Image: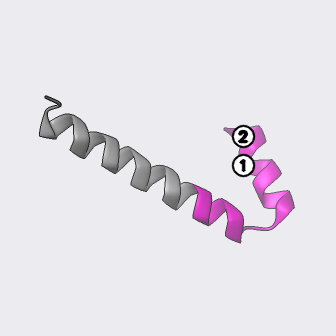
């Protein structure tokens, strides 16, 4: 049986990744390259 805390933490991580991917898809290409270089 998987604990609820683990499921909730996984869902939170998925939401964060989805938000990041959404914001990156909205930014122009050169801003995305800048973000990747500085990260």
- Where disc 2 sits, the SS reads helix
Residue located at (50% from left, 50% from top): 17
Relative depth, front residue between 29 and 12: 12
Q: Position of residue 25 (x, y in %)?
A: 70, 65
**Quarter of the figure with the N terminus:** top left
Main SS, magenta region, reads helix
Question: Magenta segment, which residues?
Answer: 21-39
- Where disc 1 sits, the SS reads helix
Q: Does the magenta stretch include residue 33?
A: yes
**Quarter of the figure with the C terminus:** top right
| Image side of residue 33 versus residue 20, left or right | right
Q: Where is residue 7 in the image (x, y as percent from the top left)?
A: 24, 41
Residue projecting furthest to the right:
30
16 lies above or below 29: above
**Gap in angstroms between the C-alphas marked 1 and 2:** 5 Å
Residue with the mark numbered 2: 38
Q: Are marks 1 and 2 in contact (CB under 8 Å)?
A: yes
Q: Residue 35 carries which label?
A: 1
Relative depth, front residue between 5 and 39: 5
Q: In which quarter of the image is residue 5?
A: top left
Relative depth, front residue between 28 and 13: 13
| Image side of residue 18 versus residue 8, left or right | right
């Amino acid at each position: 049986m998987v604990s609820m805390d683990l499921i909730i933490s996984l869902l939170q991580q998925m939401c964060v990744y989805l938000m990041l991917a959404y914001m990156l898809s909205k930014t122009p290409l050169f801003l995305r390259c800048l973000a990747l270089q500085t990260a």
